[in-house]
Amino acid sequence: MVEDRRLGDAIAYVILTIGVLIVAFPVWLTFVASTWDAATIINGKLPLYPGPYFFENYNRILFIGTSSTTREPVLGMMLNSFIMAMAIALGKIFISVLSAYAVVYYRFPFRMAAFWIIFVTLMLPVEVRIFPTFKVVSDLGMLDTYQGLAVPLIASATGTLLFRQFFMTIPDELLEASKIDGASAFKFFKDTVVPLSITTIAALFVIQFIYGWNQYLWPLLVTTKDSMQTIVIAIKKMIVTSDALTEWQLAMATAMLAMLPPVLVVILMQRLFVKGLVETEK
Amino acid sequence: MAQVTLTNVKKIYPGGVEAVKGVSFDIPDGGFCVLVGPSGCGKSTLLRMVAGLETISAGEVSIGDRVVNQIGPADRDIAMVFQNYALYPHFSVYDNMAYGLRNRGTPKDEIDKRVKEAARILAIEGLLERRPRQLSGGQRQRVAMGRAIVRKPQVFLFDEPLSNLDAKLRVQMRVEIKKLQRALGVTSIYVTHDQVEAMTLSDKLVVMNGGQIEQIGVPAEVYRKPASPFVATFIGSPPMNLLPGTIDGPGIVALGDAILEARDLRQDLPAQLPVEVGLRPEDIEIVSEGEAGSLPFDVEFIEELGATQLFHGQLAGKPFVMQTATDAVSAQAGRIWITVDPDRVHVFDMKTGVRLGRV
C-alpha cells in the first residue's frame, strides 16, 4: 500500500512539474531575452540561459526609455500604472465597503432598489459603456489625468456584492451587543465590521490591484501624453510591426517589470490571507 | 439599582402580527424575574423591548422612575447576555469587557479596575489576553457575564444564556448566575424555555403563552396552584396529567365512575359542570385495592429513572403517568389502585381554562 501511494505521488509530481514548466517556460524565455542584445534576438538564435546585458538593458529601459516608440523611461510608466491600480483598488474597497454597509445595516426607502441598481451595473463593464464614459470624462477635463484613469473604473458592483454577502454572515447579536455597549453606527463599522472584514478586504485588494494594473483599453483612450502612459500600453507600443524597429530586449525587460508589482502584491497579501484563515480556525 | 415596570406593553409587527399582547408586571429592585414559555410565546421579544432592541408598539416600560420607551439601548443602563454570547471575535477578553466602558469615556484606570474585579469574581483572570475563539463554551459564557458586570448596570437581561452549554455545565452555571445575582443585587430579567431553570432561578416567575401572561408568581406558588391547564402542564416534569371530569358536589369531582375529593375547589359551582382535573405524577400514591377514594390505574409500561420510576398507562380511558420511588412497589404492568392528597387535586374549568380554586 505504501508503495502504491509513492507511485501515485510520483505521477502527481510529474504531472505537476510538466504543468509548471509549461507555465514557466515563456516567463523564463522573456527573462532570458531581456538579458541579451538586440542582435542575438533578431538572428533567431536566442540561448536558453541569461546573457551579459542584464544591467545595460534594465538600466536603459528604466531610466531612459526606448529610442523611438515610447520615448519615456519605464520607471515613470510604472509609477503611472501603480497610481492607477492603487486608486482603483483602494477606491473600490472604500466605496463598496460603505455601500454594502448601508445596504445591509440601514433601513431606508428604496434600499432594495438601490441594491438592484448597483447589481445591474455588473452587466455594464467599462467596455460596454466606453463611449458615454469617455464623453463624460473628456467633458470633465479629466483626459490625461490620474483621476480620469481611475475614477470610471472604481464604480463597480462586484465589491459591493462581495461585502454584502460577508456582512450578512456577521451575527445580528454583535450589532445588538454594540448598541448596548454604546457604539454608534460608525463605531460599530470601524470597531467591528472592518476588523472582521480584513481578509475579504485583502482578497478584493489583490483582485482589484491586478485588474487595475492590467487595464489596457481605457488608458489607451484617455491618455495621449507620453508622460501619462501606463506600462501595459508601453509594451504594446514597443512592439512595432516591422521587426527591425522593435527593440525586443527592451520590450521583454518591460514585460518583466510589468509582471513584478502584481506578483509582489499576490505574495505579500497571500500572507495576510493565510494569517486570517489560520486565526479564524483556532 | 432599580425596579422595572411594564405597563400594558404590546409588540405589533408590520403586517399585523401581535407578538406581545398587552403585558403588565413589575420587578422589585434586586428581584430575579424569569420569563418562561414555549418558543414563539413572545418572551424574547418582551426582553428585547426592555433592552431597547425592539421598538415598543404600545404601553410603557420604565426602569427606575424613568420611562425608557424613547431611550436607546446604550442609555437605558442595562446589560444583556446573549444566547450565543455575541462576544467580539477580534477583541481579547479584556477588550470585550472594556469596550462598553471605553465608549462611555470611563477613565482608563477605572476600566482596568472594574475589568480585573469582574474577572476575579468570574474566575477568568487567566484568560484576559485570549480571544473568544480560544475559549470553551463555559468560559465564553463567563466573559459574556463579565461584560455585563463591568458596566454596573441597573438591570441585567439574560436571553437564554445557558442553552448553548452542555447539560452538566448548564447546572453549574445556573447556580453561579443565581449566586452572582444575589451577591450583586442587580435587578434581573431572564428568558428561558427551560422550566427547571425558571423554577430554580426566579423569585418571580412569569409564564407566557401566545404573547400573553398565563401566570405570575413565586415558583412554588406557580407549581402548587397553576392558574391554567397550560401552566399546569408546562411547569413540572413529567407534566401534570389532565383528565376530563365533572363537578359532583362541593369539593368533589367525578372522574368517570370514580370520585375524588378536591380541597382547593370553589364551593359555589353547579353540579355536572365539565372540568379538567389535574394530577401531578409525583403526587400520586399507591394504595391497596378497594380503599376509599381510590382510582384504578392500568399500568402499561414502566420507565426506570434511577431514583424514581414512571408508570405509564390508562386511567379512566385516558393516558396517565405517575412517578414513584423505585423501591416503593415492584415494577410490573397490570392494574393498581392509586389515590391523591385532596390538597393536590387541581380543577380547571373545561371551557375557560380558569382554575376553580378557593378565592
Image (spheres, coloured by chain):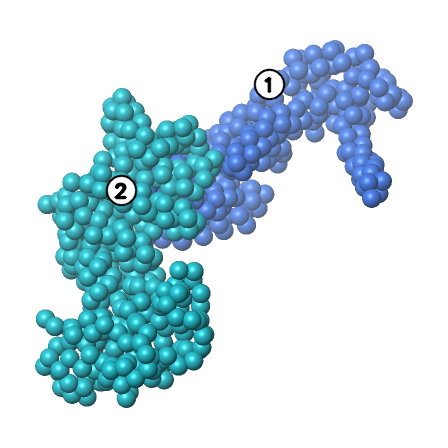
Q: Which mark is residue A89?
A: none
Image coordinates for residue B147, horizontal then vertical, percent: 31, 36
Give me the chain letter of mark 1: A
Q: What residue is shown at x 28% (from left), y 53% (from top)?
A: B200
Residues flagged by tags 1 and 2 on a common chain: no
Of residues B129 and A36, the one drawn nearer to the viewer in this rendering: B129
Amino acid tagged 1: Gly
Left or right: A21 as drawn, with respect to B73: right
Image coordinates for residue A141, horizontal then vertical, percent: 46, 30
- Residue on which the image places disc 1: A76
Seen in the picture, residue A225 relative to B3 is either above or below; the reply is above
Q: What residue is shown at x 15% (from left), y 53% (from top)?
A: B26
Q: What residue is shown at x 27% (from left), y 51% (from top)?
A: B201
Amino acid tagged 2: Lys
Seen in the picture, residue B337 relative to A185 is either above or below; the reply is below
Instruction: Report which colour depicts chain B.
Output: cyan
Give me the chain letter of mark 2: B
Left or right: B309 as drawn, with respect to B12: right
Is any atom of residue A246 visible in this view? no
In the picture, the quarter occupied by the N terminus of chain B is: top left
Q: Which mark is residue B179?
A: 2
Colour blue maps to chain: A
